[in-house]
Image (cartoon, rainbow, N blue to C red):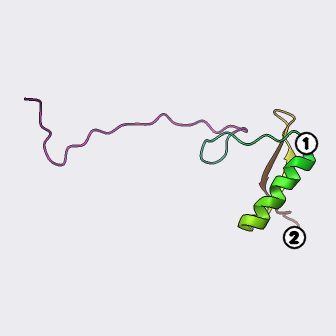
Amino acid sequence: MGKTRRPGKRKVVRQPLRIASSHTDRNGSPKTRYHSILEARQAAAAAYAIHRADLEAYQCNHCNGFHIGNRRVDPKD
């Protein structure tokens, strides 16, 4: 017979910490890279039409591709 666990005792499995990267979203998943600003803007428009998500396209300084993200709020407003 194998070992039986006592009630209340659980094995804790620790996940490695994810390092925040410019190429991952808040969940740690890789960002989608678009090949042109037009393609990224079309994806942002589709996200707005489907989810009412107000996103904007931007060029990434890391990969020179394009991504979409939350619209930045100007602190002057």
**Residue that sits furthest to the top in the current view:** 1
Q: Quadrant of the N terminus?
A: top left
Which numbered dot is residue 24? none
Q: Nearer the viewer, residue 53 or 20?
A: 53
Residue bearing mark 1: 36
Magenta range:
1-23
Please indicate, yes or no, whether residue 7 appears anywhere in the rendered image. Answer: yes
Identity of the residue drawn at 12% across and 32% down: 3
Amino acid marked by disc 1: Ser
Identity of the residue drawn at 67% across and 39% down: 30
Q: Nearer the viewer, mark 2 or mark 1?
A: 1
- Mark 1 neighbour density, 10 Å: few (under 14) some (14–19) many (20 or more): some
**Drawn side of residue 63 relative to residue 4, left or right:** right
**Drawn side of residue 4 relative to residue 77, left or right:** left
Q: Position of residue 47 (x, y in %)?
A: 76, 60
| Disc 2 to disc 1: CB gap under 8 Å | no
In reply to whether residue 20 is colored magenta, the answer given is: yes
Magenta: main secondary structure: loop
- Find residue 73 and report its image quarter: bottom right
Q: Position of residue 13 (x, y in %)?
A: 36, 37
